């Protein structure tokens, strides 16, 4: 079991692994060894709220069926790519497991209102002085 949050854990049997040949340079090895790792995880096992946040965070990595697909091919070995993909999967689910803090509406203070209006007054006066001066030059 991979512990994501106190109330969320993923069983390793729920993660499907596939390996294929990695793209890009790699010499003679690239055409022979399947080093790229692809992990597939069905998000139906997660709570609804986490799944909704995960859908937003995952973007194109989430299929229409709710399967999260992580592909890793940064490293030259299958094990390192698998570990990289698993770490990214865990990080993504952890990020989605944290509920965003609700925003509390606040009103500006009286001092902030006064400062804003004074700033607007100053700016308006400055602009009025500019137009008066430029009219006299013509």
Image (cartoon, rainbow, N blue to C red):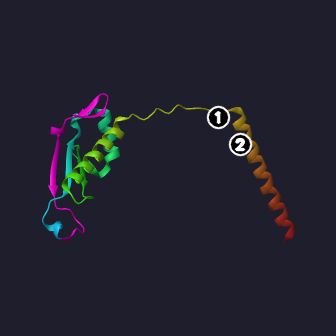
Q: Secondary structure at mark 1?
A: loop
Does residue 74 appear left or right of residue 121 in this picture? left
Q: Residue furthest right?
A: 136
Q: Residue furthest left?
A: 32
Mark 2 is surrounded, within 10 Å at the Cα level, by few (under 14), some (14 to 19) or many (20 or more) other residues, namely: few
Marks 2/1 in contact by CB < 8 Å: the verdict is yes
Per the rendering, the mark at residue 116 is: 2
Q: Say if the magenta span includes residue 37.
A: no
| Residue closer to the observer: 113 or 58 | 58
Q: CA distance from mark 2 to mark 1?
A: 10 Å
Residue assigned mark 1: 108
Query: Residue at horizontal 34%, vertical 44%?
Result: 56
Name the image quarter holding residue 100: top left
Residue 68 % position (x, y): 24, 46
| Residue closer to the observer: 76 or 118 | 76
Q: Is residue 135 above or below residue 53?
A: below
Q: Which quadrant would the N terminus be assigned to in this image? A: top left
Query: Residue at horizontal 31%, vertical 35%?
Result: 50
Does residue 83 appear left or right of residue 18 in this picture? right
Query: Residue at horizontal 74%, vertical 46%?
Result: 119
| Residue closer to the observer: 14 or 67 | 14
Q: Which quadrant would the C terminus be assigned to in this image? A: bottom right
Does residue 123 appear left or right of residue 92 in this picture? right
Q: Secondary structure at mark 2?
A: helix
Residue 99 % position (x, y): 39, 34
Residue 73 % position (x, y): 24, 58
Segment tinted magenta in the rendering:
1-27
Query: Residue at horizontal 12%, vertical 65%?
Result: 32
Per the rendering, the mark at residue 92 is: none
């Amino acid at each position: 079991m991979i512990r994501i949050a106190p109330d969320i854990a993923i069983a390793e049997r729920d993660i499907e692994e596939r390996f294929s040949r990695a793209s890009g340079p790699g010499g003679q090895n690239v055409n022979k060894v399947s080093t790229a790792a692809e992990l597939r995880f069905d998000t139906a096992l997660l709570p609804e709220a986490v799944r909704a946040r995960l859908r937003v965070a995952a973007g194109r990595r989430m299929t229409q069926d709710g399967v999260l697909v992580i592909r890793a091919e940064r490293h030259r070995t299958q094990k390192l790519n698998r570990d990289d993909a698993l770490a990214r999967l865990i990080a993504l689910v952890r990020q989605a497991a944290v509920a965003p803090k609700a925003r509390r509406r606040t009103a500006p203070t009286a001092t902030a209102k006064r400062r804003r209006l004074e700033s607007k007054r100053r700016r308006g006066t400055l602009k009025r002085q500019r137009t008066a001066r430029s009219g006299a030059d013509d």
